[in-house]
Image: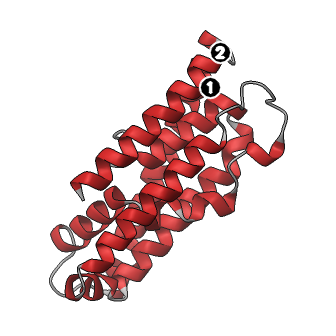
Amino acid sequence: MVSTPGPANLLIMTAGAQHGFARCIPFNIGLISGKLLLNVAMALGLTSIVQQYPEIAKVFAVLSAAYMSWLALRGWNAHIDTQRPDRELSFRDGIFVHPLSPKTWVMVVLAFSEFMPVTPTVAEQYLLIPLSFVLAQLIFHSSWCLAGVVLRRALGASKVLNRGLALLTVAVVLWAVLLA
């Protein structure tokens, strides 16, 4: 699931197309850190709270749609001025993406409910799943970012590419939220 198109992967691809791979590293580290924090919170019992109060998931879905759409649309005119650092997605921007993403919540809940032993050791509970996600994210988020770089090289820093990726990201975000 980490490799499939979703809000985070499309955001990092859009950022890669707008700013290049190297300038997206802080955002990628933020994405990975945010998911790691969510995994640790789940290991500490956040899943129980969400199951007890399902309206929390609905609030996260709405916040997710608003935040990720804002991130995607923030670079709407990045093709005009690709040197403006204020348009780059930062570590701080990335750290909130996964904790707000409905797709991430599904992945993490499934991972902990389906792949965790009934009585996990401390290492299994706090290391196995979180570090598996970190490794997968390093590989796949970087791949999506590189795909954005390749698109930009192939098509240039065009308005069509930039805005098309932003709109695609918003569409996927809304689709993910509607399914949540």
Measured from the top left, where is residue 173 in percent x and y?
39, 47
Residue 161 visible in the snapshot: yes
Q: Please state the total of marks drawn on the protein image.
A: 2
Instruction: Identify the residue at horizontal 38%, vertical 38% (top origin).
Output: 171
Q: From the viewer's perspective, tell me whether residue 64 is left or right of residue 42.
A: right
The quarter of the image holding the C terminus is: bottom left
Q: Which residue is mark 1?
A: 149
Q: Which residue is mark 2?
A: 153
Asked if the residues shown at circle 1 and circle 2 are in contact, with their CB atoms under 8 angstroms apart, the answer is: yes
- Tell me the amino acid under the disc marked 2: Arg
Instruction: Identify the residue at horizontal 35%, vertical 80% (top origin).
Output: 42
Q: Quadrant of residue 103?
A: bottom left
Question: Of helix, strand and loop, which one carries label 2?
Answer: helix
Q: Nearer the viewer, residue 16 or 125?
A: 16
Q: Is residue 112 above or below residue 170?
A: below
Q: Quadrant of residue 57?
A: bottom left
Measured from the top left, where is residue 2 in percent x and y?
36, 49
